[in-house]
Structures are given as structure tokens and as C-alpha cells.
Amino acid sequence: MFNTSISLETLNSWGKGNMVEHVGIEFIELTADYIKAKMPVDHRTKQPFGLLHGGASVVLAETMGSIASALSVENPNNQTGVGVEINANHLKSARGGFVIGTCTALRIGRTLHVYDIKIHDEEENLICASRLTVAILQR
């Protein structure tokens, strides 16, 4: 389902100079069936009370789904994906370390993709469950 000919180094280079770099997201695994990325729980991603900010979880989820779309379109030179809807259920808090997101496709259509993104802490506790819908547009 996902184009695995692109290296993790290339995926991580796409995040330079934008939100991905700012919050410290790093892609750590790419297979045909899923993508994994990690994000630190630190001063960039915590809310004022010391917990992982829900918005940071959503940034991780949307980043992963957007990359998944880029790796799933038929012709990346002529097509691009844009997020049209995201939801997130924040199920448990995180105070430090890293959170790890796993993105899988629920549906890869010609004009619409839907992704499931689960975010866990380093002890495998489910922190956030998110779903992203991406519209595929012609460039």
C-alpha cells in the first residue's frame, strides 16, 4: 500500500524547516502496511500543566497521514493530498519521553484516503486514537 522505495532519511528531510522539525517528529519505520514516527514530549509539545498537548498529538497524526498519502498516490508528480477532516480521542496523558505513532490505511481510494493513527507512549499505553481523511487533488 505504501511506497517503500523512499528512505527514512528522505521522509525525515521533508520535515526540515517546518512544523515537523519544530516539534521534533522523526519517522522511524516504513513498511508497505504502516508508518511509524516518534515525537518527544518536551517543552515544545507540552501544555502549561506539564502534559502532552492534545494539539501536538494531532500534529503528529496529521503529519503521518499526510506522508502516508504522499506514499500512496498513483502519481506523486501530478497528485497531492490535503487533509479535510481529523479527529482525535485523547485517552491518556504523557509527561515525558517520546510518543510513537503508527499510521495504517483504512481506505485508499482514487480521490479520498482515510487513515487510522494510534499514538502510544514508550510503555505501549494508548495515548491518542485519531482518524484523518485526505482529499487527493490534481496539481
Image (cartoon, rainbow, N blue to C red):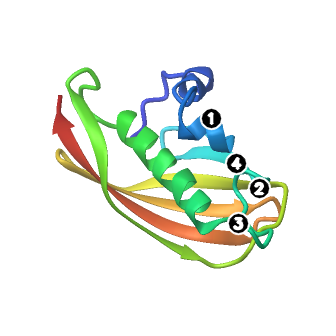
| Pair 3/4: label in front | 3
| Pair 4/1: label in front | 1
Residue 47's tag is: 3
Quarter of the image containing the C terminus? top left
User: Percent position (x, y) of residue 51?
Assistant: 76, 69
The residue labelled by disc 2 is 41
Label 3 packing within 10 angstroms: few (<14), some (14-19), many (20+): some
Residue 49 located left or right of residue 100: right
- Badge 4 or badge 1: first in the primary sequence: 1
Secondary structure beneath label 3: loop
The residue labelled by disc 1 is 21
Q: Nearer the viewer, residue 3 or 88?
A: 88
Secondary structure beneath label 2: loop
Q: Nearer the viewer, residue 36 or 51?
A: 51
User: Percent position (x, y) of residue 26?
Assistant: 66, 37
Q: CA distance from mark 1 to mark 3?
A: 18 Å
- Badge 1 or badge 3: first in the primary sequence: 1
Kindly identify the amino acid type of the residue bearing the numbered disc 2.
Answer: Val
Residue 35 located left or right of residue 3: right
Residue 39's tag is: 4
Q: CA distance from mark 3 to mark 2?
A: 10 Å
Kindly identify the amino acid type of the residue bearing the numbered disc 3.
Answer: Gln
Quarter of the image containing the N terminus? top left
